[in-house]
């Protein structure tokens, strides 16, 4: 499975940004997709995931600001980020958990099988 993330950039605090990720997975509709991020000097952090059914799960720090969505026909997943803060600055990674997929919201690095190359998001104050 190949994942290609794009849409990062430099924005100001309070701005919005939408990340996109396309996947080559043949069973995309059954694949749980997600996003992680890694800020300089920090560990990689889970942000959100979405099952093929459309169910979602978020880490507390982004609830109400970020929205994950998917388009199974386009084999794409999106991360709409609103009210961005300087602490959201990080490299954002698209990830895939291929079938069989648990209904439990695994949020560790090992819960996902494939990783994209990352896209940089920088939020200035």
Image (spheres, grey):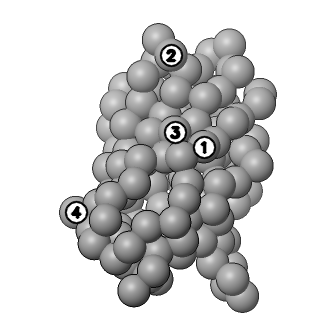
Residue 123 on image: x %, y %: 46, 74
- At mark 2, the secondary structure is loop
Evaluate if marks 2 and 3 touch, with contact meaning CB atoms under 8 Å apart.
Answer: no
> From what the image shows, is residue 93 above or below residue 31?
below
> From what the image shows, is residue 71 above or below residue 124?
above
Residue bearing the label numbered 1: 6
Ranked by sequence position, the earlier of labels 3 and 1 is 1
Could you say which is closer to the camera, residue 119 or residue 75?
Answer: 119
In the shown orientation, is residue 98 left or right of residue 83? right
Ranked by sequence position, the earlier of labels 2 and 1 is 1
Residue 85 on image: x %, y %: 37, 78
Q: CA distance from mark 1 to mark 4?
A: 22 Å
* The residue positioned farthest toward the left in the image shown: 64
- Check residue 20 in the rendering and tell me which mark sits there, or answer none: 3
Q: CA distance from mark 2 to mark 4?
A: 26 Å
Evaluate if marks 2 and 1 touch, with contact meaning CB atoms under 8 Å apart.
Answer: no
Evaluate if marks 3 and 1 touch, with contact meaning CB atoms under 8 Å apart.
Answer: yes
> From what the image shows, is residue 39 above or below residue 53?
below
In which quadrant of the rendered view does residue 52 lie?
top left
Choose mark 1 or mark 4, whichever is in front: 1
> From what the image shows, is residue 59 above or below residue 54?
below
Ranked by sequence position, the earlier of labels 2 and 3 is 3
Answer few, some or many: residues within 10 Å of disc 1's Cα (few below 14, many 20 plus, some between 14 and 19). some
- At mark 3, the secondary structure is strand
Residue bearing the label numbered 4: 64
Ranked by sequence position, the earlier of labels 2 and 4 is 4
Answer few, some or many: residues within 10 Å of disc 3's Cα (few below 14, many 20 plus, some between 14 and 19). many
Ranked by sequence position, the earlier of labels 4 and 3 is 3
Residue 76 on image: x %, y %: 52, 27
Q: CA distance from mark 4 to mark 3?
A: 19 Å
Residue bearing the label numbered 2: 74
In the shown orientation, is residue 118 left or right of residue 48? right
């Amino acid at each position: 499975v190949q994942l290609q993330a794009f849409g990062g950039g430099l924005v100001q605090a309070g701005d919005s940004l939408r990340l996109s990720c396309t996947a080559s997975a043949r069973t995309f509709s059954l694949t749980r997709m997600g996003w992680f991020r890694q800020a300089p000097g920090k560990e990689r952090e889970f942000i959100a995931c979405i099952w093929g059914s459309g169910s979602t799960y978020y880490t507390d720090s982004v609830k109400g600001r970020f929205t994950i969505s998917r388009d199974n026909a386009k084999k794409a997943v999106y991360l709409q980020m609103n009210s961005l803060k300087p602490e959201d600055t990080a490299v954002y990674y698209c990830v895939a958990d291929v079938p069989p997929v648990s209904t439990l919201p695994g949020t560790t690095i090992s819960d996902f099988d494939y990783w994209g190359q990352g896209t940089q998001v920088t939020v200035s104050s």
